[in-house]
Image (tube, rainbow, N blue to C red):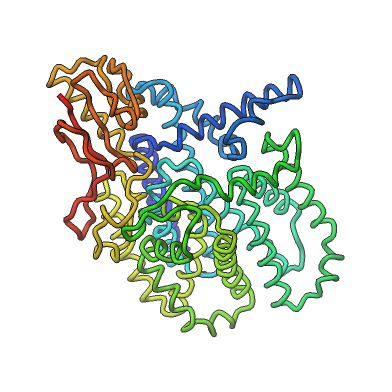
Amino acid sequence: MSKNFKNIIVSVLTFLFLVGIYLSINTGISHDEFHEHQNWQINLKAIKDFLSTGNYNDLIVYKDRYHGIGFSYISQPIQYIFSDFLLGYLNINNYGSILISKHIAVFSLFFISGIFFYLLISLLIKEKKIAFISLLIYLLYPYLFGHALFNPKDIPFLSIWIICTYLISAIIKDLFLKKNINFKDLIFLSLLTSLLISIRIIGLLIILQYLIFILFYFESKKVPVKEFLKVFKKQIILSIFLICSFTYILNPIFWHNPLEIINSVTLMSKYQQDICTTTLGKCVEALNLPASYYFVWMFFKLPIIILIGFFIFPLVEKKIFQSKFEKIIILSIITTVISILLLFIIFNVAIYDEIRHIMFLIPLIFIFSIYNLYLFNKKIFSYLGMFFVAFFILENVSLKGYSYTWLNSFSKFYNINKDFEVDYWGISNKNLSLKIRDHSTDNNFDKSNCIYGDKYSKVFLENYNFKCFKGYSELDSAKDRPFYVIKNVRNTRRSDPKECDLIMEDGYSYTFKKDKVVTGQLWFCD
């Protein structure tokens, strides 16, 4: 790699990182962020109680006791550093500054995962320019980029998963070439595996991925299993011990009874069963999913370049099999994706909010598809890749902060507002709240009157002396006019408030589609 090309890479990535951080602290606050912070506070209190008294009953009876807090171990120091700065910079309340400062940690970890994505691609593709184009496709893909600006659960989980995937691939490479395993790599992998499990309990599935990698290694190198176990007995025992130990330490709910891990898997696989997701115009219930749900959403969420790469696998299959090491990696990756999807379908795991709960599989699909395209014709991939990088930049600009709702061009043949889930996390609360601030001044609004529909608008309005914030369900009992009504998240599908004026529709339009996607509405009831 030439020095000039290295400088280009560093410059582009530095610019992208700074833009991402800026956007992350200027986006709205999702509903999940309040719950995530509450989970951390209850677990933190439980840790203190357990260390001082040996008991933590508040955690044991807490309804979301099995929600992992692993990412908070990383984010809390970052939140501590930046929350005071954001308090003044954004003029929001103290609670809001704590939540938004976590966005910096989320995007930073996603950006780091991109480096490991690049390293993983480089194990398969030796041409650095093509690997760099692949990295930009990953980092700028609107769906992931949008989530990376705020999502405190799925993006950290995805990021750690891709890092672990690189590490197991690097270990397999060492075995393949040197027939040896570095103890430092095993320790690092064990710690990150435990961290993954402590973010979401389905992180246990990474063990399945490790086994798949090892089995393909056995098949490729014709290694006898007994001989492998005998030679690497110490490494295997060490890995099992470290994963179990770190997982126990990082999950306070397991401290009083390690068997809680069974309850955690059972409960979280059926979590939020009363939620449904609008899919092709039908509200599909989380615990009554047809198998087609996964494939419908992936068809509309994955970039077309990735779909093309996936389906041309039969055309490049022979080329993959010509290299034993690449064969191990690429077949292990796609087998992992297929196996996990089948497990979710067979066990009817609760999935909602399109495919964010299987978002961690997307980078694996990217690697599989990109490698297929590269083998098919690297020039075609280079041109297509550069086109999609430019297209993703335009889409991210057009989506105005709603990149996480992104759908590919096939969706443009549908009525997106009607047929798909849109702003299911309420990011529109910031823009709608800022409109309330300006509109209330022009209309001499009594700030002791209420704002209905999004209680989290308090973050952006409390410092401007607004006093009353209530949920949409409390609107029927509203008496004192005037008041404001925010319709966002799934409330957008409810009837409009009576005798009120629509004063703002927040949303966006796609690059090549004029129809506006509505993410939220603001009503004034005078």
Quadrant, the C terminus: top left
Q: Residue 19 or 497: which is nearer the viewer?
A: 497
**Picture residue at 52% right of the left edge, 63% below the top:** 364
82 on left or right of 489: right
Q: Residue furthest right?
A: 230
**Residue 340 location, quadrant:** bottom right
Q: Relative to 51, is 135 above or below? A: below
* Residue 496, position as x, y percentages in the image: 21, 38
**Residue 510 location, quadrant:** bottom left
**Residue 208 location, quadrant:** bottom right
292 on left or right of 197: left
88 on left or right of 327: left
**Picture residue at 76% right of the left edge, 53% below the top:** 183
Q: Residue 103 or 352: which is nearer the viewer?
A: 352
392 on left or right of 126: left
* Residue 147, position as x, y percentages in the image: 41, 47
**Picture residue at 75% right of the left edge, 43% below the top:** 259
